[in-house]
Amino acid sequence: MPLSRRDFNARTVLAGAGVALTGTVGALATAPGALAADDTDRHDDGHGRPGQPGYGPLVPDPAGMLALPAGFSYRVITHSGVTTLDTGESTPSNHDGTAAFAGHRGVTLLVNNHELKGKRAGWAHPVPLAEGLVYDPAAAGGCTVVEVRRGGEVAEWVGVAGTSTNCAGGATPWDTWLTCEETEDLAGKNGMTKDHGYVFEVDPADRRANRDPQPIKAFGRYAHEAVVIDPRSGHVYLTEDASGPNGLLYRWTPPHGFRHGRGKLRTLAPDAGVLAAAKCFDKAGQFVDDLSRATKVGTVYGVDWAEVTDRDARTLSVRKQFAAGAVTRARKLEGMWWADGGTYFVSSYAREESPGAAHDGQVWFYDAKRRTIRLMVIFGVNADPSADGAFDGPDNITVSPYGGLIIAEDGNGLQHLFGATEEGRTYPLARNQLNIGTAAEPEYSEFTGVCFSPDGKTLFANIQEPGIMLAITGPWRRTKH
């Protein structure tokens, strides 16, 4: 049922008293697993006033890997071309989306995407074609499962192979991982022998459950980025990273009587449920064609949903099936994270491909109950990405158990992990020092896969190229401003 203008105005009034990062009130502390606020980051500036948020300036790493605040340290968990799987083959390259799950006896299980597009021959370290776990033997991508034991030992094995361009994804409420293919390649294109552009489920705790991988066609075939699931309604929300035209925010509604759970998604018919794309409108009831139109933190839009007619996109990409005025678009819809009764999601930047104002990143919050989205954080265009201090290009995100968000940067120039507090202030948490360019023209790979361990003591993150998973520990405390 579409939202009426009266419904929308009532719900935006309520939303103004709700979620965080607006510079007014903070509610990210309500995220699952949020810690008590006994310790804060209100450092005194010497004059009895609180100083900057976060953990202080970043200290250069003598090893040339990761600059962190004083008191923090890191450990390399996997490194493509250096570490190996339990079969002796190299850890695959191009680490991307990651989630952490609690295993038995203090074990942490991480599912790690490998964003490898196209044929296997094009990559030095593709995901190995493990028997029984292969979708398309021509494709280089997939996921690995990384087991970190209490004593520090690490093991790694294949979760799914023969998929393509596994970018982000999302954890399910039943502790499995949904890996997303950011491609639209059909069989016969770029060397592929099967169609791609789907979501696959990977169970980190049960290798047998991953055999004979099947795409979840009900979620549609397009350039998938990330996915979250509403544990109350069962709705699935998905982002699309695409251009020409810009991508869409999707919602999948389960068919009547369907119950989520381990192994259930692969049983769905290709046309099961309803796949729809977001259509936004402002307080005056005016249609919003692109999220780049919003320039002020706190902007709220109502959301209706327009049904997709051909979700498998055999002849025309899903995002191209909608006429002007039918859906709301955004450039580089990226990471998502479920918390506070909705999903935080990212639009990484907007330039000439978007009709609104240029920016270097937005973070939005979709309130599932009120069916509204609210602009939580916006980054102005970074005039000098090579200078430390400013951030641009938010990508993967996670809600921190210590309050606020932790964001992986995929912008130009320097690359950081950075935090955004409940009041919308940002602070640096890590800087990638691994130069994969030259001394004259340095280049630093993006951060990906940011997530906390189940106990909240370790932050995992990846340097995408060459493919390095890192575990960061230190004096975590509640962010307060």
Image (tube, grey):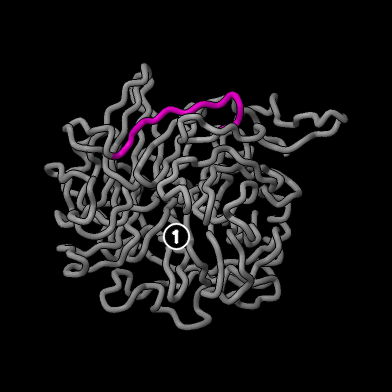
Relative placement, left or right, of 79 versus 30 is left
Relative placement, left or right, of 396 versus 273 is right
Nearer to me, 282 or 336: 336
> Which residue does the image show at 76% across and 49% down from the upper left?
24
Residue at the farthest front position: 440
> How many residues crowd around disc 1 within 10 Å: few (fewer than 14), some, or many (20 or more)?
many
Hey, what amino acid is under mark 1? Thr
What secondary structure characterizes most of the magenta part?
strand
Q: Residue 74: within the magenta? A: yes
Nearer to me, 300 or 433: 433
Q: Residue 410: within the magenta? A: no
Q: Is residue 214 visible?
A: no
> Which residue does the image show at 44% across and 60% down from the upper left?
239
**The image quarter in which residue 383 lies:** bottom right
Q: Secondary structure at mark 1?
A: strand
Q: Give how far across and how far down residue 222 sits, in percent.
A: 34, 66
Q: Which region shows up in magenta? A: 68-80
Q: Is residue 174 visible?
A: yes
**The image quarter in which residue 430 lies:** top right
Nearer to me, 271 or 131: 131
Q: Give how far across and how far down residue 241 sits, in percent.
A: 43, 63
Report the residue marked by disc 1.
239
> Which residue does the image show at 49% across and 35% down from the upper left?
66
Query: Quick one: quadrant of the C terminus?
Result: top right
Would you place residue 377 above or below residue 155 in this image?
A: below
Residue at the farthest right position: 47
